Amino acid sequence: MSTHKSKTATTISEPGKGHSVMKSPLSLLWLVVILVVMAVPIAAPSMKLLFTFAMAKGLGVLGVTVLLRAGQVSFGHALYFGIAAYAGAFLMAAMPGMDILIVLLAGGIGATVAGLFVGLFVVRYRGIFFGMLNLAFSMIFWSILEKFYHYTGGADGIRLERPNVFGSAMNHTDFGLVLYYMLVALMIGLGWYTMRWFNSPVGQLFQTIKTNETRLEYLGISPKRALLSGYLLSAALCGVGGVMMGMAQGVVTPEYVWWVRSAEMVFIAVLGGSGSVQGAFLGALIYEAVRTYASVYAGDVWQMILGGFLLVIILFAPGGLIGILQSLFKRSHDKTGGGK
Amino acid sequence: MNLAIFLLALFDGVAYAALVFIVALGLTLIFGVMRILNVAHGSLYAIGAYTTVTLTGWVLALGFAPILAFPLMLVSAVLVGVLIGGPLEYFLLRRIYDKSEVLQLLVTFAVFMILEDVQRLVWGTRPYFDSSALQALGNISVFGVTYTVYQLILLPLIAVTLLLGMRFFLRHTLTGKLITATTEDREAAQSIGVDADKVFLFTFIIGAVLAGLGGALASPTTSILPGMGADMIVLSFAVVATAGLGQIEGAALTALMIGLGRSFAVYLYPEFSVLVPYLIMVVVLLVRPEGLFGTPSARKI
């Protein structure tokens, strides 16, 4: 399954290279992957939850990926994941029977507003400071969640009641399916949007922060504002992922905001292929799979395995999984191309 | 707030600041020289604490006097520095000096993840507690407030000694000057025959020993359990960033500031105690982006 997904990913992340030759078979593959993902709840129901979590987390990772395109790494983006989930939970507690779309919207908006406040401050920094200040903000929110247990339920968190879907209450299984297909739609829609955004003028300016920030200033453009635009997008993406994860799990805890979760998102983004949209989801899927199975078969050492994996990727395959697959595909493509 | 509570908060703050400073000193030294923010520093701290408790447990079980716990702390710290810090630099960090900051951060984070599991494998998830060193020194009464000698006198004393010792070491000894020279300009130092690789290895080991020592000294005052390394790395980063990365004297002052802020919050607004260090950090960085004592770096065009 994952190989399908990744091969398709290759085409999309490499626009312009051999366009006419590669486009048709590979966009076909991309379609196949989406169809396979859509078929999972029917063909392999036991995998449904794994894919649900992977897609929700993948949306959050996509947010971190956006920042990686500007060469910045945030060790606190679980903040937006958590804020959105808590926003959803509070909304459901205050107004039971709210519609699922409104909960989703509330989460997204909550995360974006929080992103604006934190963003205005952190866009003044780069590198280690940017990463660690984000961390500080997420830790502040985390300790508020832990300590003000009258409102937040403390370490136990609060329940996120199941919202209605278009006015009707749903049972557990149906709701799971609704969430699943919503996530598929969000993954395609937001993934597509993010790729478009990277190619848009704002997105191009944003990515210049990585390559040459000074040049940006010479052009008369504020790098802070460029970074803020990407920061808001990344917060919104994390928020959507977070509120979906909250609805899928039915409970939100301060664990959502814990800094190790943030670091995990960065980890997945680098694992998948830093800066690649498909890599974010591919990485999230592999990460969730490894975590699920490793915690069953090697509960004590799964973190160690992941850490080792991360080291190997950084030292020997800096392009991540997408990078590996790209080079593999290129090789096979060159072979067939040479034969003609 | 009466005098007794004020003094208690003050003593708590000082004792805590001393511990945080020792760990932060290692972190800021490594950053100052090697430009690497070592996330695994927190793990070294935790492993230092675990090692001390284990060693002390053995030695006390053999019937030796509890006073032996003190040399054992030093032994544990050196073990952590040499056996874990040394190979870490030699086999791993040495490969990534030319990589971007972000990747360096991720590499040390990966090491952190690995070491967290190593701790769990070796020591399990059961909390450890051994306060024999604390009890060996007894208590002291100050204005009617009884406090342990260990926390009120020994810890601050060690912290101040380390601060002065580090200053002396970097400014007045040959090795220290070699380190400073390599920090200033690695290529120039190499061209006059300084073995920069050796300097980096040595610096990293010193930093790791300080992390281990922080853990060793903290071990009698708190129960040792998984996750303590994560807390400490975040906190000591807050100290180091507030002071300005690489600022040793500044780290001492901010450690005191954050330690006192936190302990007074414990007595006045307990809900905010965890928040205080980060609030201080955010407020300081808002006003002075390079930290209290940092100097703005020149922009290269």
Image (cartoon, coloured by chain):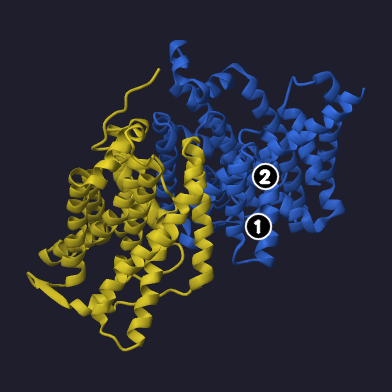
**Residue depicted at 33% across the width and 39% down the height:** B194
Q: Which residue is mark 2?
A: A283
Query: Visible in this render: residue B193?
Result: yes
Q: Amino acid at mark 2?
A: Gly
Q: Residue at x 36, y 71 (%)?
A: B52
Q: Position of residue B203 (x, y in %)?
A: 34, 49
Between the residue at mark 1 and the residue at mark 2, the CA separation in whole angstroms equals 12 Å
Q: Residues within 10 Å of mark 1 (few under 14, many from 20)?
A: some
> Quick one: SS at disc 2?
helix
Disc 2: host chain: A
Q: Quadrant of the N terminus of chain B?
A: bottom left
> Pointer 1: what residue?
A291
Q: Quadrant of residue A172?
A: bottom right
Q: Colour of chain A?
A: blue
Same chain, labels 1 and 2: yes
Dot 2 crowding, Cα within 10 Å, few <14, some 14–19, many 20+: many
What amino acid is at disc 1?
A: Arg
Residue positioned most to the left: B143
Chain letter, colour yellow: B
Q: From the top left corner, tell me how far across and down residue B57 is, in percent.
A: 37, 80
Q: Residue furthest right?
A: A340
Image position of A289 (left or right of A214): right
